[in-house]
Image (cartoon, rainbow, N blue to C red):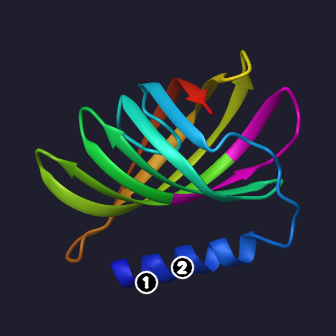
Amino acid sequence: MKKYLFIIFIALISFGISQELKKSRPTRYTAMGFFDHKTGLGIFGVSRTLYQTDKHEIFAGLGLMPVGALSMGWKYYMNEAPLQYYSVLSIQKISAMGGEMVAPYLSLGGEKKLTEKLYFNFGISAIARIYSDKKANVIAFPALNLSWRK
């Protein structure tokens, strides 16, 4: 099942990224708050943009406390305005006291630029825990944090 999720994820990224001009967005991202759209269920997260265009971004990240999460995903900016809306689709490897899992992660939200490097992010995220012997479990939760970008 994990193999199929990875293939679907790569296909979505390939389909979503067209030949666009690169936009000058910050590439280093550090977030603190209640969860994060890039690094998931952590209170502290760091990520790095690997590739970006006007509306698309591919990133890798690490979230910490109370769980550890490695993530790789695709962020799509829906508009160009002072309050930007986005969607994020990623695959995360989550390590917690209950064990480890690889899970798809979806987030919808917005971000407001407060200063040149400081942003306020808000939204709703969902993670799916997929089992081989029973029905998948989808958990939705709010995301609210401040992020520092370079």
- Magenta highlight: main SS: strand
Q: Which residues are magenta?
A: 73-86
Comparing 99 with 136, the one in front is 99
Q: Residue at x 21, y 51 (%)?
A: 95
Q: Which residue is mark 2?
A: 8
* Vertical side of 39 occupied by 91: above or below: below
> What amino acid is at disc 1?
Tyr
Mark 1 closeness class: few <14, some 14–19, many ≥20 residues within 10 Å: few
Tell me if mark 2 has few (under 14), some (14-19) or many (20+) residues whose alpha carbon lies within 10 angstroms of its own.
few
Q: Residue at x 28, y 53 (%)?
A: 94
State which quarter of the image contains the N terminus: bottom left
Disc on res. 4 = 1
State the SS at label 2. helix
Relative image position of residue 66 (x, y in whole percent): 24, 33
The answer to which image quadrant residue 43 occupies is: top left
- Contact check, label 1 and label 2, Cβ < 8 Å: yes
Q: Residue at x 49, y 32 (%)?
A: 30
